[in-house]
Amino acid sequence: AQTVTQSQPEMSVQEAETVTLSCTYDTSESNYYLFWYKQPPSRQMILVIRQEAYKQQNATENRFSVNFQKAAKSFSLKISDSQLGDTAMYFCAFSHGSSNTGKLIFGQGTTLQVKP
Amino acid sequence: GAGVSQSPRYKVTKRGQDVALRCDPISGHVSLYWYRQALGQGPEFLTYFNYEAQQDKSGLPNDRFSAERPEGSISTLTIQRTEQRDSAMYRCASSLVESTGELFFGEGSRLTVL
């Protein structure tokens, strides 16, 4: 069975600095998707970034980028120039690539506090 | 609508009562998903639909839980004979097609069973 592990329950970073959130996963499949979702205090769930496993190039969305290491089954999120609005819980998620890709397996989450 | 809408936002019920949670997905979205999220945890998959067809219900905890999407749009998640362990945030999400994996989540329905 697929599992997603986030080993950092809580992290903090100073405003304008860079922070990296870790995520590892376990699967025997070669085709899959990986995601980072953000859950701010409002409790909304917002997609931050997505990575297809068959793509070697790391995904980037503005200040958010990932370091996807397929062999190591690692998928970390880097937030550059951290802003107060980045304060949230961040969830790493995995889905199968062949079908039902909306059936996500989430990690336990990392709470990120951006300090002024 | 502009986003995924869920109702009620908050529901407090007594143990043993039935509850129905409603989800109105983004217009035109084919796939609709139900997740359950305990406090401080990541969401857990419950079930999903493509149009009106329930494709996967492997995440439903037991037969007290059921879901339907009769006309391929609005969906209802029903929990019969609620128990305290059912207390959680129930989240609905939709996606334009099945294959992208990009979900748009609603704000959730917070269920508290006393």
Image (spheres, rainbow, N blue to C red):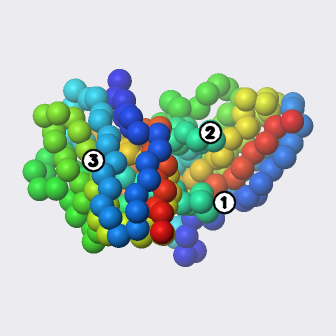
As drawn, the label of residue A25 is none
**Whole-Å distance between the Cαs marked 2 and 3?**
24 Å
Question: Is there one chain holding both mark 1 and mark 2?
Answer: yes
x, y percent for residue A112: 46, 53
In the picture, the disc for residue B6 is 1
Residue with the mark numbered 3? A76
User: Pointer 2: residues within 10 angstroms few (<14), some, or many (20+)?
Assistant: some
Q: Marks 2 and 3: which is nearer the front?
A: 3
Instruction: Count residues near mark 3 (Cα–Cα under 10 Å), then give few for <14, some for 14-19, many for 20+.
Output: some
Indicate the amino acid at tag 3.
Ser
Q: Residues within 10 Å of mark 1 (few under 14, many from 20)?
A: many
Examine the rendered structure and indicate whether residue A95 appears above or below residue B72: above
The chain containing the residue under callout 3 comes to A
Q: Secondary structure at mark 1?
A: strand
The residue indicated by pointer 2 is: B38
Secondary structure of residue under mark 3 = strand
Give the amino acid at mark 1. Answer: Gln
Relative to B57, residue A50 above or below: below
Q: CA distance from mark 1 to mark 2?
A: 17 Å
Whether residue B69 is visible, yes or no, is no
* Marks 1/3: CA–CA distance: 31 Å
Residue A109: give x, y in percent of width and height: 46, 43
